Amino acid sequence: MEFVPLGDSLVPKVAKLVNRCLEFEAVTPWTVNRCTILDPNYDPEMAVIAIDKGEPVGVVIGAQRTKAPPELVSREHGWLKLVVVEPRYMQSGLGDQLLLAVERALKSKGAKDVRVSDFVGWYFWPGIDLRYQDLIRFLGDHGYVKVNENVEYEVDLLGLRPSSLVLEKEATLAAKGYAFTVAPQDRRSEVIEWVHSNFGPLYSHEVSETFRHDVPSVWLALKGGEIVGFSAYRTSELDWFGPIGVSEEERRKGLGSVLLYKSLLSMREEGRRIALISCNPHLFFSQIPSIRGVRDYWILSKKL
Ligand SMILES: CC(C)(COP(=O)(O)OP(=O)(O)OC[C@H]1O[C@@H](n2cnc3c(N)ncnc32)[C@H](O)[C@@H]1OP(=O)(O)O)[C@@H](O)C(=O)NCCC(=O)NCCS
């Protein structure tokens, strides 16, 4: 058995390991890249891969916010983005070894606590799927406790139609001077700055991702030409919807619902079958007829 950092050549194999061991996942090499090498905070010393006979059999990836977003940079907190070990190696203590190696690396770099696995901006999942009871138990045995939870909703986009109620809201809003438009590339900095000042650096990072597409995957609500709300989709992954936000003084007027449908219908037109929405349980989303909560995530944490 040897322990190596994650390099480009191992990425496809790590994706396969994840899908083999975590039966509810369907990650691609893109996802592994996005959450590791492409994360500006990526530190190879915290991505430890156990290799046996040339194949990865266990991976633990840690992270700290050392570069991005700049406002949240701090060595005080650590995260585990990925903990996966081939079941047949669990009894051998490989999981303990990998976990301790990454915890030690985090501690030596100043982390006082560590969370699994909601490293917003560059995460695989916003927590641990509750169905991975063995993983939760393994982390529990190592002192991790539940500190929060998240839900992932799935919207079946097949059959999605504009809701008559929302169309009515849109017409009423239009009569009052509101308009809805896809953000043009030349409003990139304005949009990102607006989201930043209204919703902070994590939302603005995610919205900035939509501008990597020729036509940015973000809808805007405008009043007199000024931005008052947005809804983003296809941020880091093709099936992802969100974030969405409306300025505080403009809420409960229907803007959020119109923006939500605009993005979901864009996804539908672009050929996506489903939209995935991860967030704290939220009443706002229950207005979509084909939405259902599909995954419950626990966020675990431990003092180092
Ligand atoms: C969620 C959000 C985008 C909704 O925008 P909005 O313009 O106020 O939404 P709408 O006016 O279209 O609301 C539609 C319905 O959703 C429900 N709803 C909206 N906000 C709600 C809230 N905070 N609590 C409970 N229900 C809510 C209501 O049923 C509402 O209908 P009603 O006003 O007739 O009762 C807005 O509250 C927001 O920006 N929140 C902060 C960011 C956020 O939490 N985003 C979601 C996670 S990414």
Image (cartoon, rainbow, N blue to C red):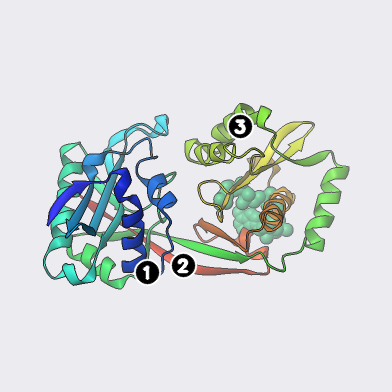
Disc 1 marks which residue? 130
Q: Left or right: where does residue 26 sit relative to residue 241?
A: left
The kind of secondary structure element at disc 1 is: loop
Tell me which label, 1 or 2, sits earlier in the chain.
1
In the rendered structure, are the residues bearing label 3 and label 1 in contact, judged by CB atoms less than 8 Å apart?
A: no
Q: Residues within 10 Å of mark 2 (few under 14, many from 20)?
A: some
Alpha carbon of mark 3 to alpha carbon of mark 2: how far?
31 Å
Task: Please state which of residues 14 and 42 is positioned toward the viewer in this rendering.
Answer: 14
In the rendered structure, are the residues bearing label 1 and label 2 in contact, judged by CB atoms less than 8 Å apart?
A: yes
Residue 99 on image: x %, y %: 18, 55
Q: Left or right: where does residue 24 sit relative to residue 102?
A: right
Task: Please state which of residues 76 and 84 is positioned toward the viewer in this rendering.
Answer: 84
Q: Left or right: where does residue 92 sit relative to residue 44?
A: left
Alpha carbon of mark 3 to alpha carbon of mark 1: how far?
36 Å
What residue appears at the point 13 percent right and 71 percent down from the top-left corner?
91
The kind of secondary structure element at disc 2 is: strand
Residue 194 circle label: 3
Alpha carbon of mark 1 to alpha carbon of mark 2: how far?
8 Å
Residue 282 on image: x %, y %: 56, 59
Residue 188 circle label: none
Judge whether 17 appears above or below 110 on screen.
below
What residue appears at the point 15 percent right and 50 percent down from the top-left corner?
3
Residue 231 on image: x %, y %: 64, 46
Amino acid type assigned to the residue bearing label 1 in the image: Leu
Disc 2 marks which residue? 295
Judge whether 256 appears above or below 27 on screen.
above
Q: Is residue 145 visible?
A: yes
Q: Residue furthest right?
A: 175
Quadrant of image for the N terminus:
bottom left
Question: Residue 153: which quarter of the image?
Answer: bottom right
Amino acid type assigned to the residue bearing label 3 in the image: Trp
Q: Is residue 112 visible?
A: no
